[in-house]
């Protein structure tokens, strides 16, 4: 049986029709997984109305949306436009307030997968914890560390696997409250270069030439110097939180390009 979907006609999420598979449905909330480049909700960094939440509100009366029980949709979590992963959507205001209260009290856990340059974390440790408060830059669409005015933010980076052949590793990044740009900025502050990140670090994604210099591009020469995964190699793959005496766990598989890059780098999950 195919998954239920949220669909938007042309003009809402771009010039083409868009469909998002629903990966989880709960009592008054659901979750979809977005691609890198999609905007979940308009915020301080993204003002475009071509986002999932605004499009849901605009089409709340359509059968495709109303049949899901959507009354007044709200974004529960924050997720950067530039990365892929889970979008948790409350279908009405009371559920949104309840889930945000749980999140505000530290009940949520967000877990990201990322592919980074280097065969080890800084210092050779198995994990690195970053506890730096974040503030939106006054003029640019980016975050900065501010001990005076910033909001509390903490991220734990854990080493999951190391490439036996290339200068790369697979990491997880965990936090209880994911602020915009948090994982990317905390990674940069910890000395971790996530492939494809060019705002807080300059860490280009590997190309076919770099990974397979002897045979890459033979069949497709035009792809020889293009990144294997032309996005930031960062994916929000798991959200969990307590609800009604149980623990809700939502998972979203990494994009095909992310998985392809991990395989090319010989990184086992």
Image (cartoon, rainbow, N blue to C red):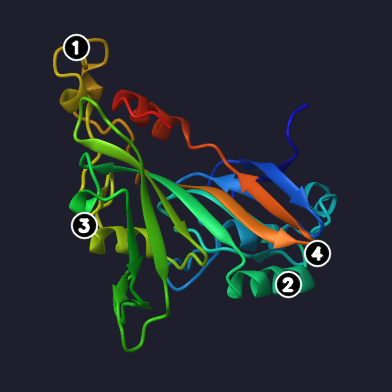
User: Residue 71 at what x, y percent from top left?
Assistant: 80, 64
Which of discs 1 and 2 lies nearer the camera? The answer is 2
Which of discs 2 and 4 lies nearer the camera? The answer is 2
Pointer 3: what residue? 191
Pointer 4: what residue? 71
Q: Is residue 31 left or right of residue 41?
A: right
Element class at badge 1: loop
Element class at badge 2: helix
Q: Quadrant of the N terminus?
A: top right
Residue at 61% across / 69% down in the picture?
A: 103
Neighbours of disc 1 within 10 Å: few (<14), some (14-19), many (20+): few
Pointer 2: what residue? 98
Q: CA distance from mark 1 to mark 2?
A: 54 Å
Element class at badge 4: loop
User: Residue 266 at what x, y percent from top left?
Assistant: 31, 25
Q: CA distance from mark 2 to mark 4?
A: 16 Å
Q: Residue furthest front?
A: 125
Residue 112 visible at all: yes
Q: Which mark is residue 73?
A: none
Pointer 1: what residue? 215
Q: Is residue 9 left or right of residue 256?
A: right
Circles 3 and 2: CB atoms closer than 8 Å: no
């Amino acid at each position: 049986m195919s998954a239920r979907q949220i669909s938007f006609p042309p003009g809402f999420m771009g010039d083409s029709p868009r469909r998002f598979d629903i990966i989880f449905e709960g009592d008054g909330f659901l979750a979809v997984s977005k691609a890198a480049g999609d905007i979940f909700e308009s915020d301080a960094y993204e003002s475009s109305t071509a986002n999932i939440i605004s499009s849901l509100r605009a089409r709340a009366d359509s059968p495709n949306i109303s049949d899901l029980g959507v009354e007044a949709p709200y974004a529960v979590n924050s997720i950067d436009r530039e990365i892929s992963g889970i979008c948790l959507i409350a279908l009405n205001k009371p559920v949104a307030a309840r889930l945000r209260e749980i999140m505000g009290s530290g009940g949520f856990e967000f877990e990201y997968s990322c592919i980074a340059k280097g065969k080890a974390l800084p210092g050779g440790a198995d994990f690195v914890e970053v506890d730096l408060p974040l503030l939106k830059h006054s003029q640019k669409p980016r975050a900065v560390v501010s001990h005076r005015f910033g909001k509390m933010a903490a991220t734990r980076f854990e080493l999951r696997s190391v490439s036996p052949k290339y200068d790369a590793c697979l990491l997880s990044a965990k936090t209880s409250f994911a602020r915009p740009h948090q994982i990317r900025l905390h990674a940069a502050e910890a000395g971790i270069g996530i492939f494809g990140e060019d705002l807080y670090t300059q860490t280009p994604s590997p190309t076919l030439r770099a990974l397979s210099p002897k045979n890459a591009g033979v069949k497709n020469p035009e792809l020889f110097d293009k990144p294997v995964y032309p996005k930031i190699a960062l994916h929000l793959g798991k959200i969990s939180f307590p609800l009604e005496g149980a623990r809700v766990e939502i998972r979203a598989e990494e994009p095909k390009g992310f998985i392809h890059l991990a395989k090319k780098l010989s990184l086992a999950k």
